[in-house]
Image (cartoon, rainbow, N blue to C red):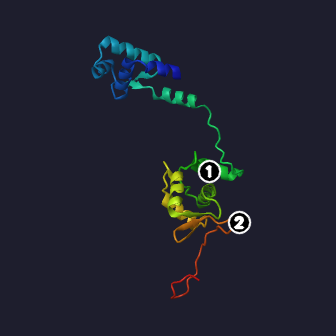
C-alpha cells in the first residue's frame, strides 16, 4: 500500500464508511452492512477493495484494520529522520539536547541532575542576552514558549534558572549574568546561630 493507494481508497465515500465500520468494531461482512446502512453488494465490494489494498484484514477474530500497514506507510513516508543539531559544537551536550529539546521546545527536564543543568544552561543561553534586564512578565512569556506541549511549566523553569544563577532576580527584574560570571549555585548557606540571617 502506498500513499497514493490510501488517497484513492478514501476518496470514495462508500469505502470510508466501510472502513469506519471496521475501525469501530464490525468484525464480519454482515456487521459492516448493518452498521453502514449500505446495500450489501455495495458494502461487500468496498470491503473487498479495502482488503486488497491491505487497509483491512481478516484474522481469527474477524475483520480488523491493518494498523501495521498504516504504520509501515507512515514510516516510509517520513523517511530517515535527520539528526537534530542545536548548534552547540559540544557532542555531549548535543546528545542530551536531542533527547530533551525538540523544535525549540522542552520535551521534559532530565531527571539526572547533571543533564538537567546542561539543558537549563542551554535554555538560558538561547533565551536571554547577558546583562540585559527583563521584566518578570517577559521572562514568563519567553519561558512559556519553551514549555508549550511539554511536561514542565514556565514557573518551574524560571525557578531552576534563578537557583542555578543563570538568571539573577532583584525587585521583579531579571538579568542573565555576563559571560564568564559565576553561574554556579550556592550549595550551602551558613546561618549565624540564632540570627536567622545568611552570612
In this rendering, the answer to whether 101 lies above or below 196 is above
Determine the secondary structure under disc 1. Answer: helix
Residue 155's label in the rendered image is: none
Q: Position of residue 191 (x, y in %)?
A: 55, 83
Q: Name the residue under label 2.
A: 180
Q: Position of residue 25 (x, y in %)?
A: 34, 28
* Residue drawn where x is 57% and y is 50% of the image: 100
In this rendering, the answer to whether 132 lies above or below 104 is below
How many numbered discs?
2
Seen from the viewer's position, the closer of residues 191 and 137 is 137
Q: Earlier in the sequence, mark 2 or mark 1?
A: 1
Is there CB contact under 8 Å for labels 2 and 1? no
Q: Where is residue 178 in the image (x, y as percent from the top left)?
A: 67, 65
Q: Position of residue 11 (x, y in %)?
A: 43, 19
Report crowding for label 1: few under 14, some 14 to 19, many 20 or more residues within 10 A (C-alpha).
many
Q: Mark 1 points at which residue?
A: 97
Report crowding for label 2: few under 14, some 14 to 19, many 20 or more residues within 10 A (C-alpha).
few
Choose mark 2 or mark 1, whichever is in front: 2
Determine the secondary structure under disc 2. Answer: loop
* Quarter containing the C terminus: bottom right
Judged left or right of residue 177, residue 134 is: left
Seen from the viewer's position, the closer of residues 29 and 148 is 148
Quadrant of residue 40 in the image? top left
In this rendering, the answer to whether 187 lies above or below 137 is below
Amino acid at each position: 500500500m502506498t500513499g497514493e493507494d490510501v488517497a484513492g481508497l478514501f476518496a470514495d465515500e462508500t469505502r470510508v464508511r466501510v472502513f469506519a465500520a471496521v475501525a469501530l468494531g464490525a468484525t464480519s461482512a454482515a456487521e459492516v452492512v448493518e452498521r453502514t446502512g449500505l446495500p450489501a453488494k455495495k458494502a461487500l465490494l468496498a470491503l473487498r477493495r479495502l482488503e486488497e489494498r491491505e487497509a483491512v484484514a481478516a484474522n481469527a477474530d474477524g475483520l480488523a484494520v491493518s494498523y501495521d500497514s498504516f504504520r509501515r506507510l507512515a514510516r516510509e513516508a517520513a523517511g530517515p529522520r535527520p539528526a537534530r543539531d542545536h548548534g552547540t559544537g559540544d557532542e555531549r551536550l548535543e546528545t542530551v539536547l536531542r533527547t530533551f529539546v525538540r523544535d525549540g521546545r522542552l520535551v521534559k527536564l532530565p531527571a539526572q541532575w547533571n543533564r538537567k543543568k546542561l539543558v537549563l544552561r542551554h535554555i538560558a543561553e538561547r533565551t536571554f542576552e547577558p546583562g540585559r534586564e527583563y521584566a518578570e512578565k517577559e521572562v514568563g512569556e519567553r519561558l512559556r514558549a519553551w514549555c508549550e506541549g511539554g511536561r514542565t511549566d514556565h514557573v518551574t523553569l524560571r525557578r531552576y534558572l534563578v537557583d542555578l544563577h543563570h538568571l539573577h532576580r532583584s525587585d521583579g527584574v531579571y538579568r542573565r549574568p555576563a559571560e564568564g560570571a559565576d553561574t554556579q549555585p550556592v550549595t550551602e548557606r551558613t546561618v549565624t546561630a540564632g540570627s536567622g540571617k545568611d552570612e
